[in-house]
Amino acid sequence: MRTRKTLLHLAVVYALFASSGALAANTAELPCRTTAECAEQARKIGATVDKSALKGGAYESQFSWLNRINKASIVMLSEEGIVSAQQGRRIAGGVQHVIDQAAQPDGKRPSDVLQVEQIMIDKIGPEASLIHSGRSRQDMYATYRLAVLRAQVLDYSDALNASRARLLKIAGDNVDTLIPAYTNGVQAMPISYAHYLLAFEASFERDAQRIRELYARLNLSPMGSAVLANSGWPLNRERLATLLGFDGVRENSLDSSQVSTFDIPLEAAGIASSSAIRVGALIGDIHTQYHQTRPWLLLEEGSTYTSSAMPQKRNPGLLMRTRESASDVIGLAGATTIRAHNVTTGMTDYKAAFDDLGLFGSAADMFERLDMVLDALVINPERALEELDADWTTSMELADTLEREHKVPFRIGHSFASLIVGQARDQGLLPKAFPYADAQKLFTQAAQKYGWKEQRLPLSESAFRATLSPRTMVETRKGTGGPQPAEVRRMLGEAGKRLQADERWMSERRQHLIDADQALDKAFARLLPASR
């Protein structure tokens, strides 16, 4: 008889599906015996399905979060007197049953609200549905998605900070390593490798600032706003927010589950994309060294792979995989935006795009691969200095020194330096070999061009040679933020302090979530029947 009823029930459900669609399917009335069956039933009608539930279910799985929301709901409903103490205990027992049965070999972990509720009803009867007083899938799923985004953003922030720490460590080891810096793709000036890395660390630190600002907007609870206009029940939204680890409520009930679901994920996606663009640039700078026959920056031998055909080649696969990950993040961030574009308020297209597309999983992969690159870097300071000495990267210092020490107008010094570079390149001369006598003649030529009174080069030969030294140029820089070693060491210290502050902030956020979980579990445990 039970089998006939089940078959009849399925036939009715099928008839409803096959009809004009005037009636919607109720996921609670679609019988399912396993997690996979529940997911398939929900999938067939377009209800939300959490794929992670089929993989054993992490804490952040939709099933787990629906249970936490159910715990918070029954605690709040009991505290506010919306359900009686007896009802609260009975319903809490139903919530616990859902959790307990899921741990059994044949247990179910459905990701739809009504499927979870049906497990409670099967255990304690229709009274279980009182837990749904004043709420909807809309506010529940909005809360769950924010919790997922919250967790993913925190993981992303941890990965970002780990890469920043590596950059600072390498920078600390290379304050005196001089390298060429480039503008417009052309060697421009000497700086230190520490100065270079600090520039990227500073940009990632701005991403950390953006994450903190985002988090203040992200971590506000939609729970208790029902579909979009609250309910007839006097729900304590602030209590729900506290129990679920949020810092407050998103006040406007329409904004909570329908409008903020556009911009909050898009802001998070934008920050990840911002990081990815800088990661791509950093990897690109390293990769250009592999175009050279005598590079000064490489990955250690064990971190590359040999060509299958050309035995001399060492292919930097780590660089390519990291760049690909960065490109994936940028592409997925764009896809997240496209999913939200031109969609009317209240649709589902945009609400979980960041998670469906795996945006922050790709961001985690990107930083993990970047860390592998940074750990494998081999820097050759002597070869980097040789690269500087092989070009006229310090020629600007000639003009600066003449103006700073001998009051020669900058344009005259610039013209003089330009004349030297032109002749040197024409004759294949490097800075260390350029004749001092020729420098004297060219200064006179530049002075005459501008009608300058002093037409003799005011630098001795030793001063002239020193001015063309990359190390001298770096060490004589002035002003805040330059590559001079003392300033670089100061910036390293400040950057380290900021990183420590960001790590403390992360620790505090995570501890707040742990404390909220524990408080919720304690409040819920007080509702459970004493016989348990």
Image: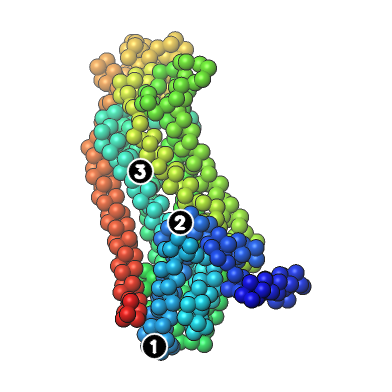
Residue 498 visible here: no
Asked where in the image residue 516 lies, by quadrant, the reply is bottom left
Asked where in the image residue 373 lies, by quadrant, the reply is top left
Query: Circle 3 is placed at which residue position?
Result: 163
Residue under the point 43% across and 63% down:
104
Q: Kindly identify the amino acid type of the residue bearing the numbered disc 3.
A: Ser
Q: Kindly identify the amino acid type of the residue bearing the numbered disc 2.
A: Gly
Which numbered disc, 1 or 3, marks the residue that appears first in the sequence? 1
Which sits in the foreground, 89 or 458?
A: 89
Disc 2/disc 3 C-alpha distance (Å):
30 Å
Which numbered disc, 2 or 3, marks the residue that appears first in the sequence? 2
The numbered mark at residue 246 is none
Q: Nearer the viewer, mark 2 or mark 3?
A: 2
- Tell me residue 493's x, y (percent): 23, 45
Q: Nearer the viewer, mark 1 or mark 3?
A: 1
Disc 1/disc 3 C-alpha distance (Å):
53 Å
